Image (cartoon, rainbow, N blue to C red):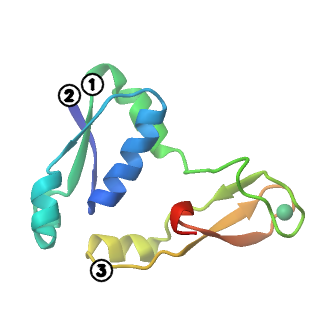
Amino acid sequence: MKIIAAFPTVELAYLAAARLESAGIGVEIRDEAITTLTWLYSPALGGVKIAVDEADVADAEAILCEPASEEGILVCPHCGSRDAAVRALSAAGGVLLVLNVPLPLAFQTADCRACGKSYGVPAHPNLG
Ligand SMILES: [Zn+2]
């Protein structure tokens, strides 16, 4: 197994792990317990890590580098198109996550590829 990514929180690690597992890649999550117990030290420990088989490293890295698009689920309120891309977390949000500031990420921004307009989408459909 080889560590391919690290995350400041368990939740982010599980989101990434779910993307890999849905692509059929076996995932091992490391340092989850210590980070949960002492989240303040997560940055010092290097965060929650995801490891995959050596044979899956290239595929896994490619999947994690793709923007998390939800094609077919989002519908543009301006033109009705389902062709949209959800923006990656903003730089400011990323900095706050690194600093372990709890951030209520209720909405992300999606960009419609058909009409070019942007609209807000729930960051976590289950909380929607
Ligand atoms: Zn549109």
Residue hosting label 1: 53
The quarter holding residue 75 reads: bottom right
Where in the image, quadrant-wise, is ligand 1 located? bottom right
CB within 8 Å, label 3 to label 2: no
Residue hosting label 3: 101
Is residue 88 visible in the rendered image? The answer is: no
Please tell me how crowded label 3 is: few (under 14), some (14-19), or many (20+) other residues with Cα within 10 Å: few
User: Circle 1 — which element?
Assistant: loop
Q: Is residue 108 above or below residue 125?
A: below
In the foreground, 115 or 123:
123
Drawn side of residue 124 relative to residue 116, left or right: left
Query: Nearer the N terminus, badge 1 or badge 3?
Result: 1
Give the distance between the C-alpha atoms of the residues marked 1 and 2, in whole angstroms.
Answer: 4 Å
The quarter holding residue 9 reads: bottom left
Query: Nearer the N terminus, badge 3 or badge 2?
Result: 2
Q: Position of residue 42 (x, y in %)?
A: 16, 64
Residue hosting label 2: 1
User: Circle 3 — which element?
Assistant: loop
The residue depicted at 27 percent of the width and 24 percent of the height is: 53
In the foreground, 23 or 89:
23
User: Circle 2 — which element?
Assistant: loop
The three-letter amino acid code for the residue at tag 1 is Asp
The residue depicted at 43 percent of the width and 74 percent of the height is: 93
Q: Position of residue 110 (x, y in %)?
A: 67, 64
Q: Position of residue 54 (x, y in %)?
A: 27, 23
Query: Nearer the N terminus, badge 1 or badge 2?
Result: 2
Q: Position of residue 4 (x, y in %)?
A: 28, 39
Drawn side of residue 6 relative to residue 118, left or right: left
Q: Is residue 96 above or below residue 72?
A: below
